[in-house]
Image: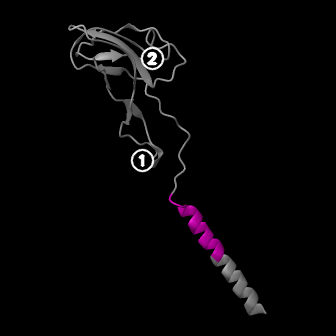
Amino acid sequence: MKRRGLLLVLLGAVAVVLALVMFSRGSGSTVCPAIGYAYVGDVELVFPQDPVSVAACFGEGCTAAAVTRSPDGKWLVPQSQPYLVPPVSVTSVYVEAADSSGARIASALPIVTEPTGEYPYGRECGGPVRFKPVQVPFG
């Protein structure tokens, strides 16, 4: 009887150790912190030919405001007033533009994000993103 009790205790201890090892290694899943990454930088507009006028804004039913070319030649729309009136989730940009041939566009265009390559909590938890340049088609 003593042998049987000792065997049960020993088997129980082995089961507990195995459970702890399995629990500590997990099932390959990682617990990530509850952090959301928002990109608050400019949205770059890229045109197939130089526009003569550009206006843009963020949000459904927004009023487009004139955009000026940056000193380095880029068309950048900042996430600030008058282009953005909070609260708006920036997932698209409304663009009104014209080129010298008379081609015009007035359309909401999707904004695509890409990872910055930084993963502060590991690749499986994701990380900060940035906006890819928005291609503005004339025609």
**Taking 36 as reference, is 106 above or below it?**
above
Q: Quadrant of the N terminus?
A: bottom right
Identified by mark 1, the residue type is Arg
Quadrant of the image containing the C terminus = top left
Residue denoted by label 1? 123
Horizontal relation, residue 17 to residue 127: left or right: right
Q: Amino acid at mark 2?
A: Phe
Say what secondary structure mark 1 lies in: helix
The answer for how far apart the CA atoms under marks 1 and 2 are is 30 Å
Does the magenta stretch mainly form a helix, a strand or a loop? Answer: helix
Among the 4 quarters of the image, the one containing residue 14: bottom right
| Front in this rendered view, residue 3 or 84 | 84
69 over 136 or under it: above or below: above
**Mark number displayed over residue 58:** 2
From the top left corner, tell me how far across and down residue 122 is, in percent: 44, 47
Instruction: Identify the residue at the far front of this view.
Output: 139
- Residue 136, percent across and down? 30, 20
Would residue 116 be counted in the magenta stretch?
A: no
Q: Residue at x 72, y 83 (%)?
A: 8
Which residues are drawn in magenta? Answer: 15-28
- In the rendering, at what x and y percent does residue 67 appear? 34, 9
